[in-house]
Amino acid sequence: MIAGPYLLVTGLGFLLSADFYQRMIASSTNAEPMLVNLSGAAHFVVGLVILVQHFQWSTAPEIAVSLVGVGAAAKGAALIAVPGLTLKSPKLSKTGLRLTTTGFLAFGGYLAYIGYVADFF
């Protein structure tokens, strides 16, 4: 129930503050090491919290929620274990950021719908 709103707010941030996020992504190779580690820790903990509370793989909605947990934990683990390699990942173009925004809004909307409106859980 937390993944949908998080993805919606993130997608909204990408939409409303695209220039900020484009600069943030472009400057990630120069990121402060402590902030990279804290970001990794936050992603990892959030991912594990989701998986501890919801590790279910029977229906499409359950799989979607569990995949958010796996993705967050994997990103956090990568930021902690191999930060240099993780930060060297290809940078998003403006088109890539728009596609990411669309994905976050669509997936976040779906998860919010199944978490708060539909009676899936």
Image: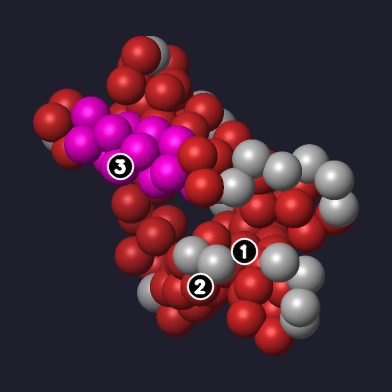
* Residue to which mark 1 is pinned: 104
* Residue to which mark 3 is pinned: 42
> Dot 3 lies on which element?
helix
**Observer-nearest residue: 12 or 89?**
12
Q: Earlier in the sequence, mark 2 or mark 3?
A: 2
Q: Tell me if 47 is positioned left or right of 90 in this view.
A: left
Amino acid under label 2?
Pro
Q: Tell me if 116 is positioned left or right of 73 in this view.
A: right
- Name the spot of residue 31 as percent of width and height, x first: 22, 35
**Observer-nearest residue: 41 or 23?**
41
* Residue to which mark 2 is pinned: 5
Residue shown at 35% from the left, 55% from the top: 23
| Cβ–Cβ under 8 Å for marks 1 and 3 | no
Q: Distance between the residues labelled 1 and 3?
A: 19 Å
| Cβ–Cβ under 8 Å for marks 2 and 3 | no
Start and end of the magenta stretch? 37-50
Name the mark nearer the viewer: 2 or 1.
Answer: 2
On the rendered image, what quadrant is the C terminus found in?
Answer: bottom right
**Residue 72 in view of the camera:** no
